[in-house]
Amino acid sequence: MSSWSVQSDGESQTLKLGEKLGRLLQQPTLVLLRGDLGAGKTVFARGVARGLGVDPIIPITSPTFTLMNHYQARLDLYHFDLYRLSEPDELIELGFDDYAYGSGVALVEWPEKLENSEISGLWVHLKRIDDDRREISFCLQGETDEKLITALQEICHWKQENNNGRDVD
Ligand SMILES: Nc1ncnc2c1ncn2[C@@H]1O[C@H](COP(=O)(O)OP(=O)(O)OP(=O)(O)O)[C@@H](O)[C@H]1O
Ligand SMILES: [Mg+2]
């Protein structure tokens, strides 16, 4: 299992990190976004959507009541928020597996509701440090997607360079 972590110093940086990931995703990927209420999961998801090329005029909001929002992009994006999932049967009704292991990118907020921490995919854990700062850790579980590993290294490297004050995009 490989893992990397990076510190975000504000909402715009989390957005940027998500956008970088979205731009670098090359194939169907399941992304599991862990973190407490207000940790920044939806902010990160918004960045991924932008990076995948979802039309910038479309707002990316948490699908709290609908459980899933679908956006068309370079790879289709299925954004889940399972916070209000009351029973696992609802996942079957939603067709969760078809999206999670389908032809697009599935982003899942509150993956704890799946009650399976062994799920293969890219786990992203956002932890609150203080009001503005978050620790974001990436853990690629059960997969050896070399391109994704390179992408994650690139993302963490970009942040390091940014911290050193260099003007990088
Ligand atoms: N570094 C940061 N990264 C992300 N969000 C930040 C950061 N610093 C402050 N924030 C604030 O934290 C909040 C994160 O909200 P967001 O809706 O993304 O959380 P969430 O994890 O999706 O919560 P929920 O579990 O309720 O869906 C926003 O108000 C944002 O402005
Ligand atoms: Mg959210």
Image: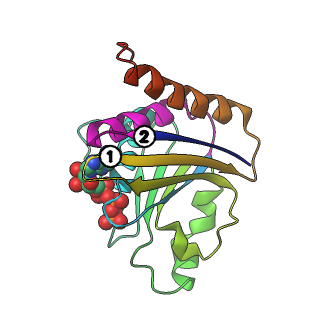
* 126 or 65: nearer the viewer: 126
| Left or right of 104 in this view: 78 | left
Residue 54 visible in this rendered orientation of the protein = yes
User: Which quadrant would residue 39 be assigned to in this image?
Assistant: bottom left
At label 1, counting other C-alpha atoms closer than 10 Å, the crowd grade (few under 14, some 14-19, many 20 or more) is: some
**SS majority, magenta:** helix
Point out the tag, 1 or 2, that comes first from the N-terminus.
Answer: 2
Q: Quadrant of the C terminus?
A: top left
Residue 104 visible in this rendered orientation of the protein = no
Report the span colored magenta.
7-28
* Residue 133 image label: 1
* Residue 7 image label: 2
List x then y, in percent, for residue 77: 47, 48
- Disc 1 to disc 2, C-alpha distance: 7 Å
Residue under the point 53% across and 25% down: 157
Residue under the point 50% across and 35% down: 21
The reply to whether discs 1 and 2 touch (Cβ–Cβ < 8 Å) is yes
Q: Amino acid at mark 1?
A: Arg
Ligand 1 neighbours mark 1 (CB distance < 8 Å): yes
Q: Amino acid at mark 2?
A: Gln
* 27 or 130: nearer the viewer: 130
* 80 or 144: nearer the viewer: 144
Residue under the point 63% across and 49% down: 139
